[in-house]
Amino acid sequence: MKILLVEDDNFLSHGLQMALQETGHAVELSKDGAEADLLLAASTYDLVVLDLELPHMDGLEVLQRLRKRGHSTPVLILTAREGVKNRVQGLDLGANDYLTKPFELAELEARIRALLRKEHWGNQTEIVHGNLRFDPGGRRVYVDEESVDLSVREITVLELLLRRAGRVVNKDQLLDELASQEFELTYNALEIVMHRLRKKLERSQLSIRTLRGLGYVFGKA
């Protein structure tokens, strides 16, 4: 996923950039509100993490201009401004979430995962790839309209692969996603989950390919 991180604190911005890159995201960094506004007008991002206290243009104005252009990109406000009034103002202007400093990195990462999930699935009632159908609400999987009995771990892995169909998903991303659901797995245990998932999806027109040293790709068989 491509994230724009708008933060003018050098220490914090570089630390967050490295942390998010380690979880598999492409992170572009901006330390200036006016620059961020130009980037958002010219490029497409999956998520914006936005500070409010910025040089040359306040973060709320950046947010307001983004929404006026009709962009629905999820925005997570990350700021030292506290109080209900500031949160309400940010949310009213179109922010999707609001986290005040100081914060725990694990909480930020969890909120980012939640926003990316919501943005990708939107209000869709089902996701169809070939003869496989996934119901995000009921968390059920069907192949040729027959229900496939998957464990919670297998569904969590499949959901991430579906969200990134055609793109490489590395093992650390999968383990992070499983950890967010309170499943602590080793690399070997993940291989077992993948083996079982492949067996259960044999009747589908899709496959999970292993790219040695890179990760997995979900797509047509």
Image: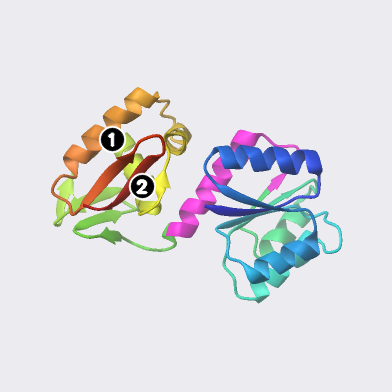
Q: Is residue 102 magenta?
A: yes
Q: Which residues are magenta?
A: 99-120
Residue reaching furthest to the right = 56
Secondary structure under tag 1 reads helix
Residue reaching furthest to the front = 212
Picture quarter containing residue 63?
Answer: bottom right
Q: Image check: 20 left or right of 151?
A: right
Residue at left offset 79%, top offset 61% = 33
Can you give x and y, in whole percent of width and height, for residue 167 in the image? 40, 51
Q: Is residue 32 magenta?
A: no
Residue at left offset 76%, top offset 50% = 7
Q: Which residue is mark 2?
A: 161
Q: Count residues near mark 1 (Cα–Cα under 10 Å), then give few for <14, some for 14-19, many for 20+.
A: some
Residue 194 marker: 1
Can you give x and y, in whole percent of width and height, for residue 74 in the image? 58, 59
Residue at left offset 28%, top offset 43% = 209
- Chief secondary structure of the magenta portion: helix
- Label 1 and label 2: CA atoms lie apart by 11 Å
Task: Give the amino acid at mark 1.
Answer: Met
Residue reaching furthest to the bottom = 69
